[in-house]
Image (cartoon, rainbow, N blue to C red):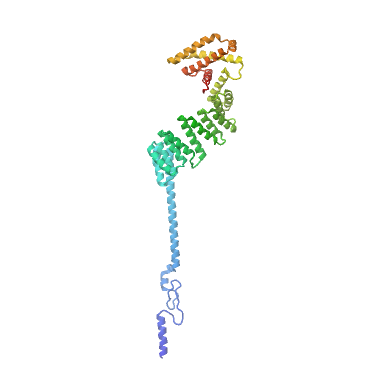
C-alpha cells in the first residue's frame, strides 16, 4: 500500500514538471523549449505566427533588408549624379553657345553654374577661362588660368589660352613661350589638327612682330609634318609667300600639285612664288594653267598680264638676240618718256627735282636713239635702259601705278639690285 502511494506521487510530480509519464520529453522545433504534455506545438511560437523562427532566419532577413537599402541608396545616388551631370551639361552648352556668338559676358554665369554642378571638369574650367579673356577680365583670367596651369602644366589648350592672354597684354616673350608650350603639350582630341592651327597662329604672331627668321623656322617645322593633303600644302605655301621665302613656297605648291595636278589655287600660288623670285618664264607657265583651271580669277588674270609684259619688255632677258635687245631698249625709252610727260607736277621738291633731271636725260638721249647705234654702242644701250627704268620707278613712286607695261618696267627697275617686286 505504501509502495503504490510512492509511484503515484512520482508520476504526479513528473506530470507537474511537464514531462509525460513513461516517455521522452518533446521539444519545440523552432525555439527548442519543452512542449506541454500532449502538445505538438509550442504555445509561444504558435501565438507569434509567421514571425517565429530561429536566429539564422532573423539574420538572413536582416541581410536582405540591408541589401535592399544599399540598392535603393545606390540607385538614388546614381540618379542624383545623372541629374547633376545633365544640369551641368545644359549650363555648359548655354555658356559655350554664348561665347561662340561673341557674347562673353553672357557666357560667364552659365559656365560658372556648370562648374558648381560638375566640380573640377577641365573642359568647363578652360571654357570659363576663355570667356574671361574674351570678356577683357584679364587680371581675373590670368589668376584663374595660372591656377589651372599648376594642376595641368602639360595641357596644350591651356597653354594656348595663356599665350593668347599674353598677346592681349602685349607680353611678346611670354606669348611665344606659351605658344611653344602648346605645340608640345597634350591635346584632348584632334591633336595634329589643333597643333597645326596653333603653329599657324604663332607664325602670324611672329611675323606681326618682325621676327621673320623665327617665323620661317616654325613654318618649316609645320610643313615638314604635313600629310599629303593639297589644302594643307597650299596653306603652308601661302605662309611662306607672306614670309617672302619664295623657294619654300614654290616647293609647297608643287607638293600640292603632285596630289592635285589641276588645282587652281596651287597653280596660282606656284605662279606667284615664281614671279616673286624673278623666274618669269616659270611664272608664266603656272599662271597660264591657273587661268585655264580657274577662269575669271582677276588676280590670276592681272598677274598673268604683268608677267607677259615683263617677258616682252625686259631688254636684259637671257639669251635674247642683239636686234631684239635694241628694239626693247627703244620701246622702254618711249614708254618711260611718255610716263614722265603724263606724271603731274609734284609739290615735293626732292621728287620734282628728280623728275626734272630725268626729263633732261631724256632730251640728251633721244637724238641718239637709232636702232643701229644701240646695236653698236653698248654704253648707249645701257644708258637708255637705265634711264627707262629710273624714270618708271620715279614715276611709280610719285604718280602711282600706270599701265601694265609701266608697272612691268617699274618691277624690272626694283629688281636691279636684287630687290623684290
Name the image quarter holding residue 381: top right
Residue 68 relative to residue 295: left or right? left
Q: Is residue 298 above or below residue 109?
A: above
**Quadrant including the N terminus:** bottom left
Q: Is residue 420 above or below residue 123?
A: above
Q: Nearer the viewer, residue 159 or 14?
A: 159
Q: Nearer the viewer, residue 138 or 417?
A: 417
- Residue at 44 percent across and 55 percent down: it is 74
State the residue lying farthest toward the bottom.
Answer: 1
State the residue lying farthest toward the front.
Answer: 379
Q: Work out whether residue 100 can be spotted.
A: no
Residue 53 relative to residue 253: left or right? left
Residue 410: give x, y in percent of width and height: 51, 19
- Residue at 44 percent across and 49 percent down: it is 82
Q: Nearer the viewer, residue 147 or 74?
A: 147
Residue 108 relative to residue 270: left or right? left
Q: Work out whether residue 72 can be spotted.
A: yes
- Residue at 46 percent across and 42 percent down: it is 155
- Residue at 47 percent across and 38 percent down: it is 182
Residue 46: give x, y in percent of width and height: 42, 71
Name the image quarter holding residue 11: bottom left
Residue 412: give x, y in percent of width and height: 53, 19
Q: Nearer the viewer, residue 183 or 190?
A: 183
Residue 118: give x, y in percent of width and height: 42, 46
- Badge count: 0
Q: Is residue 221 above or below residue 365?
A: below
Amino acid at each position: 500500500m505504501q509502495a503504490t502511494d510512492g509511484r503515484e506521487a512520482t508520476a504526479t510530480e513528473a506530470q507537474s514538471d511537464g514531462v509525460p509519464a513513461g516517455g521522452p520529453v518533446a521539444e519545440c522545433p523552432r525555439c527548442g523549449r519543452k512542449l506541454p504534455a500532449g502538445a505538438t506545438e509550442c504555445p509561444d511560437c504558435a501565438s507569434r505566427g509567421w514571425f517565429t523562427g530561429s536566429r539564422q532566419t532573423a539574420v538572413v532577413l536582416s541581410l536582405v533588408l540591408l541589401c535592399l537599402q544599399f540598392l535603393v541608396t545606390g540607385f538614388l545616388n546614381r540618379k542624383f549624379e545623372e541629374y547633376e551631370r545633365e544640369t551641368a551639361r545644359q549650363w555648359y552648352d548655354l555658356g559655350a553657345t554664348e561665347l561662340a556668338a561673341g557674347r562673353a559676358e553672357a557666357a560667364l554665369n552659365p559656365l560658372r553654374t556648370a562648374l558648381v554642378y560638375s566640380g573640377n571638369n577641365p573642359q568647363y574650367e578652360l571654357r570659363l577661362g576663355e570667356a574671361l579673356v574674351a570678356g577683357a577680365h584679364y587680371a581675373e583670367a590670368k589668376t584663374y588660368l595660372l591656377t589651372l596651369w599648376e594642376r595641368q602644366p602639360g595641357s596644350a589648350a591651356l597653354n594656348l589660352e595663356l599665350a593668347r592672354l599674353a598677346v592681349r597684354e602685349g607680353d611678346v616673350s611670354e606669348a611665344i613661350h606659351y605658344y611653344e608650350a602648346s605645340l608640345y603639350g597634350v591635346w584632348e582630341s584632334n591633336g595634329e589638327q589643333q597643333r597645326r592651327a596653333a603653329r599657324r597662329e604663332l607664325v602670324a604672331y611672329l611675323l606681326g612682330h618682325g621676327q621673320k627668321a623665327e617665323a620661317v623656322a616654325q613654318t618649316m617645322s609645320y610643313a615638314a609634318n604635313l600629310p599629303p593633303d593639297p589644302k594643307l600644302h597650299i596653306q603652308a605655301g601661302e605662309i611662306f609667300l607672306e614670309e617672302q621665302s619664295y623657294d619654300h613656297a614654290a616647293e609647297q605648291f608643287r607638293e600640292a600639285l603632285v596630289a592635285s595636278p589641276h588645282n587652281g589655287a596651287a597653280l596660282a600660288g606656284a605662279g606667284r612664288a615664281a614671279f616673286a623670285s624673278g623666274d618669269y618664264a616659270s611664272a608664266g607657265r603656272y599662271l597660264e594653267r591657273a587661268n585655264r583651271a580657274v577662269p575669271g580669277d582677276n588676280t590670276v588674270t592681272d598677274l598673268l598680264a604683268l608677267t607677259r609684259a615683263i617677258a616682252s619688255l625686259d631688254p636684259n632677258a637671257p639669251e635674247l638676240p642683239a636686234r631684239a635687245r635694241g628694239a626693247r631698249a627703244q620701246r622702254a625709252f618711249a614708254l618711260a618718256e611718255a610716263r614722265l610727260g603724263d606724271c603731274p607736277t609734284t609739290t615735293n621738291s626732292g621728287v620734282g627735282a628728280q623728275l626734272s633731271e630725268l626729263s633732261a636725260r631724256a632730251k640728251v638721249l633721244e637724238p641718239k636713239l637709232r636702232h643701229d647705234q644701240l646695236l653698236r654702242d653698248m654704253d648707249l644701250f645701257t644708258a637708255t635702259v637705265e634711264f627707262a627704268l629710273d624714270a618708271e620707278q620715279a614715276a611709280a613712286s610719285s604718280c602711282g601705278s600706270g599701265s601694265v607695261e609701266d608697272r612691268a618696267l617699274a618691277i624690272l627697275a626694283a629688281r636691279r639690285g636684287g630687290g623684290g617686286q
